[in-house]
Amino acid sequence: MNSLFVIAIAPGIAFALVLYLTDRYDREPFRLLVKIFILGALSVIPTALAENFLSMFNIFAGLLAAAYTSFVVAGFTEEFFKRLVVVKFALFNKAFNEKLDGIVYCAFSALGFATVENIIYVVFRYSANPYVGILRGFLSVPAHMLFGITMGYYLSLSKFAETDEQGRKYYKLSLYIPVVFHGLFDFILMAGIHWLMGVFIPFVILLWIYNLKKLREYRIISKNNFNNIKYKK
């Protein structure tokens, strides 16, 4: 049980640490990051309730049933509550003062969620198979983080938008695009189509490339802001 617990929590904490170290120029308050991580973990509770409720309306069969579960039950519900944590407890905090912050906060919320989800699967549901924890550590947990990076990218565009119209547009995208990514990720695994599984690894690779590019873009902006402030001093 103890070793399974370590396997379950290690990926989330490791990725959170990497993100914390990546945000080196205007680092977020550690206590706020811990708070967002914990609240992201607790968001599993309302998410589970909502998912159970929405599952009652899955009247479909075959691929439509898999699509409903992937995009609506899991994708929309999980991304909604993970974003809600950031919107309620970080978006309007004075520490949220640059675009990179959106990525950091959303990724921390996502990793908190992913850690508890991982504990449920690894320690309790599939405790007889330790390889589940290893597989989820390489796929599911980082996938949640990548969805969080996408979410944070657009949430920051919303916060720092020049017009209200742009702000509303990016705010919607901060939910819709992670839902699409999440839904595709789950649907490929749930559909049970052999040829579709052939695109899973390329899809995951593209997710990494897309989100690392977004992370790098905002990190460069953060560095430039830091250097400009340093130069003015």
Image (cartoon, rainbow, N blue to C red):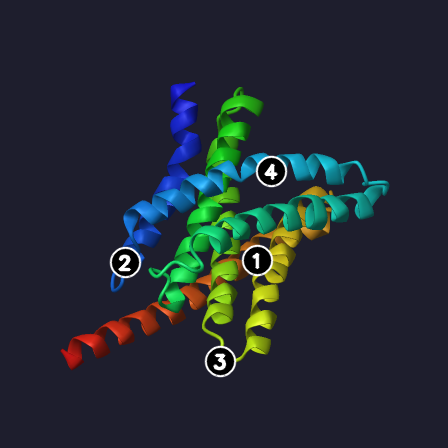
Disc 4 from disc 3: Cα separation = 34 Å
Mark 2 — residue?
27
Q: Please identify, in this view, whether the residue under mark 1 or under mark 2 is nearer the observer.
A: 2
Q: Where is residue 105 in the image (x, y as percent from the top left)?
A: 42, 54
| Front in this rendered view, residue 98 or 116 | 98
In the displayed structure, 110 sits above or below 121; it is below
| Front in this rendered view, residue 119 or 136 | 119
Residue type, label 3: Glu
Q: Position of residue 11 (x, y in %)?
A: 40, 40
Disc 1 from disc 2: Cα separation = 33 Å
* N-terminal-most mark, 4 or 3: 4
Residue at 43% x, 24% y is 4
* N-terminal-most mark, 2 or 3: 2
Disc 1 from disc 4: Cα separation = 32 Å
Residue 162 is tagged as: 3
Disc 2 from disc 3: Cα separation = 24 Å
Q: Please identify, in this view, whether the residue under mark 2 or under mark 3 is nearer the observer.
A: 3
Residue type, label 2: Arg
Residue type, label 4: Pro
